[in-house]
Amino acid sequence: MTHDTITLTTAQAIIRFLENQYIEIDGTEWRICGGGFGIFGHGNVTCLGEALYDARDALPLYRGQNEQSMGFAAAGYAKQWLRQRFMFCTASAGPGTANLLTAAALAHANRLPMLMLCGDTFLTRLPDPVLQQLEHFGNPTLGVNDAFKAVSRFWDRITHPAQILQSLPAALNTMLDPADCGPAFLGLPQDVQGWTYDYPRSFFDKRVHHIRRQAPDLQEVVAAAEAIAQAKRPMIIAGGGVQYADAVAELTQFAERHDIPVVETIAGRANMLQDHPLNIGPVGVTGSDSANTIAERADVILAVGTRLQDFTTGSWTAFAPDARIIALNVGRHDATKHLSMPVVGDAKLGLKHLTDHLGDSRAPADWTAHARDERAKWVAYTDEITTPSNGPNSYAQAIRVVNDRCHARDRVVAAAGGLPAEVTAHWQTKDIGTVDVEFGFSCMGYEIAGGWGARIAQSEREPDRETIVFTGDGSYLLMNSDIYSSVLTGKKLIICVLDNGGFAVINKLQNNTGNESFNNLIADCPTVPNAFAVDFEAHAAAMGAHAETVSNPTEFGAAFERAQSADKTCVIVMKVDAYDGWTTQGHTWWEVGTPHVSDRASVREKHEEIEAERAKQRRGV
């Protein structure tokens, strides 16, 4: 070794590099990597584990209970930090790594940074076939890790220690890129992890990074400004990218200056406060009557920081056929969907440039007044349906109970099932960026694990605030072990388990398409001769949480207040009705495959009814 180099193993070099990468956020320097989630096995414990032990103070390692939930926790962490910081996940070769696939897909769909450091088979192949190795007879290089190519923004297999000099910075730059952000995967063969190399000491120098802000093209800005200025009925769709770009203030200022109504996507919930007069509500399949009413009449739609998922667009039926869509997005792929007029660039800079070219242009007063009137009708509806005494126990009532009692800066986490729709529709935003409804991948099991990751991030800057998780019984049964993780690590959660006896939202879809209830609610499973209710309270208590079961929203409210005062994770269980209490307004058409032929008249009738709405579907224009 010379004075300019240092001899390290591949694993040691990876960890030392991560230790020295920083980012400046609001004048404070933070390590970009906040630590990691890890489960050790023979593919990562001896070498990577050795390196992580020496870095345990700088890069805290949280021991997960399941690799998939570790990835969900990393996603929740990245969301809480607005993609400015990330966590790594390490898993052993074989099934441990395979378990991360779903979490990687979630991070990819949601454009979230997550670094996966996963064991791999021996590069020398001398001991092949090793424990847990998949053998492909015609291609010995192919293994489980290759499956991650479809769900990673950056993928590499480290076959020599020197390779990380190129691959590790490339992975980091991918995760920090606003347009290409997503999970990065490094396959680490077990032997290569322990091989040494004389690395340049400068590779481990402290580096302070900044997220790039790409200014939009002037010609695109001018064209978009002209279209907005000429609009008779303009509207803004605010997506999750508004928060990632730190453009919430610019969005509000732009809307106020030009008096343009704003609607929010699922990922864009909490871009504007509930009581802002230009906040017209959530749009799309899980939206509001108010937002969808103006969406179908708008002639120019400025879509900011949204990938225009089908739940936002109503499978592209939510907008007038001749409406012009202007897409302000840092990613070219998203800015050009459905022949949108693109403004490719950072949302914060883009909104400023658009304002400069719009001058004092304002939307017609009667249009904005109409939007506000529609919003008032929606507020009255949601106030009625969420009233605790209105009908049987429901998701909407539970949401209202929590909403009325939580602190403005508490974070709410929900995911797949019926709860995302109900939270999106009814949550009254008290402060910016406090809602995480995971619907990019609509992934059951994210709720508790993602909440744990969000709480870890939240405790780094807002330790006095709560992370509140809404989950149904189906998602709870799918993945609940991070209740134990949260108790072990002292990262308190308040988990609301709303039990409707199975997968009630899919049962609702089943019924709404003319089908009979089948295999969704536990009571409708023909292979279940003796259905019984799970004792969620006892189960959660067995993992160390405070837990209680309540019978109505009034008791739920009292239990929530006790949970707020508690010193560790609390689980509150309440049964809700599987059929009544759902939000019935606000839904746009959503394309689902229905049978073109069926022996059941109800299925045929629903098919014809659904297909009739297809006439409104935009065909790429």
Image (cartoon, rainbow, N blue to C red):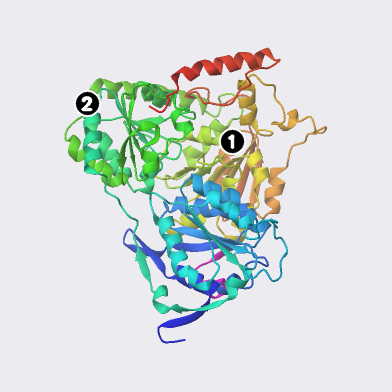
Residue drawn at x 57%, y 76% as measured from the top left: 195
Can residue 69 be seen in the rendering of this structure?
no
User: Which of the labelled discs sits on residue 417, or is there none?
Assistant: 1
Name the main secondary structure of what is drawn in magenta: loop
Q: Which residues are magenta?
A: 52-61
Query: Which mark identifies residue 379?
Result: none
| Residue lying at the far right of the rendered structure | 529
- State the residue position of label 2: 230
Q: Secondary structure at mark 2?
A: helix
Q: Is 15 left or right of 46, judged from the image as shown?
A: left
* Element type at mark 1: loop
Q: Amino acid at mark 2?
A: Gln
Q: Position of residue 415 (x, y in %)?
A: 55, 41
Marks 1 & 2, CB-CB < 8 Å contact: no
Q: Is residue 27 magenta?
A: no
Q: Kindly report the distance in space between the C-alpha atoms of the residues bearing marks 1 and 2.
A: 41 Å
Q: Residue 325 in the image: x percent, y percent?
A: 33, 30
Q: Is residue 532 visible in the rendered structure shown here?
A: yes
| 283, 302: nearer the viewer | 302
Image position, residue 597 (x, y; %): 66, 17
- Which numbered disc, 1 or 2, marks the residue that appears first in the sequence? 2
Q: How many marks?
A: 2
Q: Amino acid at mark 1?
A: Gly
